[in-house]
Image (cartoon, rainbow, N blue to C red):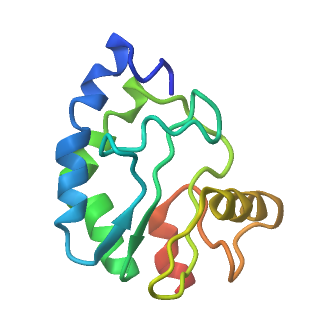
């Protein structure tokens, strides 16, 4: 993030979290998302106080793609430069999970580190753009 999550500069982003999380939860293919008792993950300081964690499970790639790029989520994220610094390394990673399992933050960190050091493999297979996933299937 460019600013602390509770700052006035992040208010435009934070104000949309409840709606965008509800959109995800009601989207076809959605299974689970990481959240605290507050209903979002902004209070999770796992990667540092300037990093928001977003972790979710979807039934299939197409459902995730549709949510990310073909829903109101895309409009909100078109404004991400207002709230987030440009990251030059991999910050998004996808991997297959056995049905019924929930990933841990440690597992997510491990998959992201593997992606950073080895690049896309059959374990972690996505870096900065979900659209790349279509070529990996």
The image position of residue 14, as x and y in percent, is: 29, 30
- Extreme-right residue of the structure: 117
Residue depicted at x 65% and y 52%: 90
Residue depicted at x 16% and y 66%: 26
Where residue 69 sits, quadrant-wise, is: bottom left
Q: With 64 as the anchor, is 97 left or right in this view? A: right
Residue depicted at x 43% and y 56%: 34
Judge whether 122 appears above or below 36 on screen.
below
Judge whether 73 appears above or below 47 on screen.
below
| Front position in the image: 54 or 44 | 44
- Extreme-front residue of the structure: 37
Judge whether 53 appears above or below 92 on screen.
above
Q: How many marks?
A: 0
Q: With 12 as the anchor, is 107 left or right in this view? A: right
The image position of residue 68, as x and y in percent, is: 32, 59
The image position of residue 130, as x and y in percent, is: 46, 64
The image position of residue 117, as x and y in percent, is: 83, 60
Where residue 17 sits, quadrant-wise, is: top left
Residue depicted at x 17% and y 45%: 19
Where residue 9 sits, quadrant-wise, is: top left
């Amino acid at each position: 993030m460019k600013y602390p999550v509770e700052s006035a500069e992040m208010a435009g982003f934070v104000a949309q979290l409840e709606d965008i999380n509800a959109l995800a939860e009601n989207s076809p293919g959605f299974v689970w998302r990481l959240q605290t008792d507050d209903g979002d993950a902004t209070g999770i300081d796992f990667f540092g106080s300037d990093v928001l964690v977003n972790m979710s499970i979807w039934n299939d790639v197409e459902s995730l793609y549709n949510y990310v790029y073909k829903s109101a989520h895309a409009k909100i994220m078109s404004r991400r430069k207002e709230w987030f610094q440009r990251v030059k390394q991999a910050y998004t990673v996808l991997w297959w999970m056995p049905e019924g399992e929930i990933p841990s933050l440690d597992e997510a960190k491990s998959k992201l580190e593997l992606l950073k050091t080895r690049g896309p493999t059959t374990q972690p297979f996505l870096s900065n753009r979900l659209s790349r996933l279509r070529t990996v299937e």
